[in-house]
Amino acid sequence: MKIAGKILSYTVMISAVLIIIVCGCGNSRDGGDGGKKKVAVVISTLNNPWFVVLGNTAAGRAEELGYEATIFDSQNDISKEVNHFDNIIAAGFDAVIFNPTDADGSIANVERAKKAGIETFCIDREINSNTAAVSQLLSDNYSGCVAMGQYFVKRVGREGTYAELLGLVGDNNTWNRSKGFHSVVDNYPGLKMAAQQSADFDRNKAMDVMESILQANPDIDAVFCGNDAMAMGAYQALASAGKAGDVLVFGFDGAKDVINLIGEGKIAATGMQFPKVMAQKAAEMADEYEKGKRDFPQKLPIAVELVSRENIEKYSAYGKK
Amino acid sequence: MEKNKVKILKYCIGILITGIVLYHSVYFSHLDTVRDAADATVFDAKAYAENFWRNELPAVMKRAVDASELLDLFERDMPGAVEQYARTLGIASLHAYLIEGEGRIEEITENGLLIGLAGDPSGTVLIETLDLFGNAVRDASGLIDVSDFPNTMEFNTVSAEINRIVRIEIAGPALEHSAVGKNVRFTGAAEVSEDDPAINPLRIIPIEIIWKD
């Protein structure tokens, strides 16, 4: 009887130890080992200060909420983004705050993460899927550029010639901005678009593109740029050509350089996106998801505000004062 | 002889099998058929906006707030106005309102009809006929959800199509029938920022204009 009792107590002890080990392993991604949960912040490019603010803010907010945050730079390269997601899945991250490189090409990465039990929250750039990510927090680019178009007409007038620098052609933001702008400007037949070229949201490319546009169209009155990096590149090209005071430059983002130049009267306007608001909100939503909330809007637009010489005193870089 | 016959038979069977495999490997369609099939998958914003305008929007027009009441509320209690009457897209300080009212055409400007509101000596609104842009009608209706669209470009194209309908069916005829002194009843939509309550006149994208004389 004594032996049977001993065997029973050993069996109970071994079972208890096994249960603890199994549960411990199963909960390793939940921080059950006492470690912090992990959030990956995947950013399309850190070669643009606006995205640096976006990434740093998301990571900072995640850390404030108790997570370990790691930033990945995709360098606007979908293959690098694929590698990042491979690493994120292999390393067992708990959530991804994701600024995609391509509206269609990035869907597969989000779906792979989802399959591995890692939920994704998109910020700033959209993917063309309503089911892959938990939620997508996006600047209301179209409305922002409707306001920009109205201000453009106010400053340039109803007659004139202008150029447009587009961003990455595979990114929805590029077209939402362009379409919002044209939904206004195209109603004025006296406003002629002399050139429309992509500069990939890149400052150096924008400078090159603007130089060639100026050679073919030396008398343009204005240039509308799909982001502030391109606005800075265009402004540099205009300054080099001695035309900085003659051609009105319009940007989009609310980056520090452009806000400063609006203050100095050298750039006409920008559309203030709120990268800090977007990034903080995404980190908070990821935290809410981890805590059990499931009811999120698939798309959450964040308003864009027009910043010009008339209201520049209300704004600083990347947000309101 | 017999051997040759077997060889020929084998070749014939081989060619027949190869033919069947090739025939079922490649399908040829007329280019127009392929194009039509591709077009069918493209979002038809025009049809969507037409359906919204004719079949869905009329049902929510009764939700419109009286213009004088709203202007008064903007002055006294902007947060209250937002809470009671606004529709907001995402996180924004810009809100959309469905508005109705009646009054007298005080002036016909380059931008539209300046209406003095009946029974409200200080209340004026501008019925836009030129600057028909933005998302006022789409968002004020509260009927169209951005999350229902696979991408925001489609969602935004709907606004452009709604504004096109307004331009053709409402703004154009409004200018033809207008004269200073005429009385009108209107329903429309406006976007107002809670940060910038200096709204005079309130600019309204018209949805319906009824001439009272």
Image (spheres, helix red, strand yellow):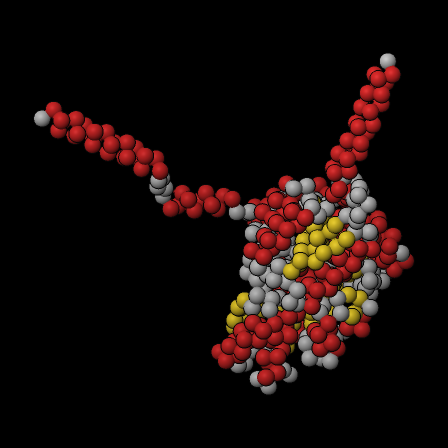
Residue at 54% x, 67% y is A198
Q: Camera-side residue: B3 or B23?
A: B3
User: Vertical placement of A36 versus A191: above or below?
Assistant: above
Q: Is residue A138 visible?
A: no
For residue A291, above or below residue A18: below
Q: Residue at x 32, y 34 (%)?
A: B21
Residue A58 or A242: which is nearer the viewer?
Answer: A58
Which quadrant, please, contains the C terminus of chain A?
bottom right
Horizontal and vertical percent position of residue A194: 52, 72
The answer to which quarter of the image holds residue A44 is: bottom right
Q: Residue furthest right?
A: B76
Q: How many marks?
A: 0
Residue at coordinates 34% horizontally, 35% vertically from top-left?
B24
Residue most toward the left? Answer: B1
Front-most of A273 and B159?
A273
Residue reaching furthest to the front: A3
Q: Is residue B41 visible to the viewer in this orientation of the structure?
A: yes
Residue occupying the far top of the picture: A1
**Quadrant of the rendered structure where residue A179 is?**
bottom right
Q: Position of residue A124 (x, y in %)?
A: 68, 57
Q: Position of residue A10 (x, y in %)?
A: 82, 24
Residue A149 horizontal/vertical position (percent): 64, 66
Instruction: Tell me the quarter of the picture where residue B104 sits.
Output: bottom right
Residue located at (59% from left, 81% from top): A238
Quarter holding the N terminus of chain A is top right
Vertical placement of residue A173 versus B42, above or below: below
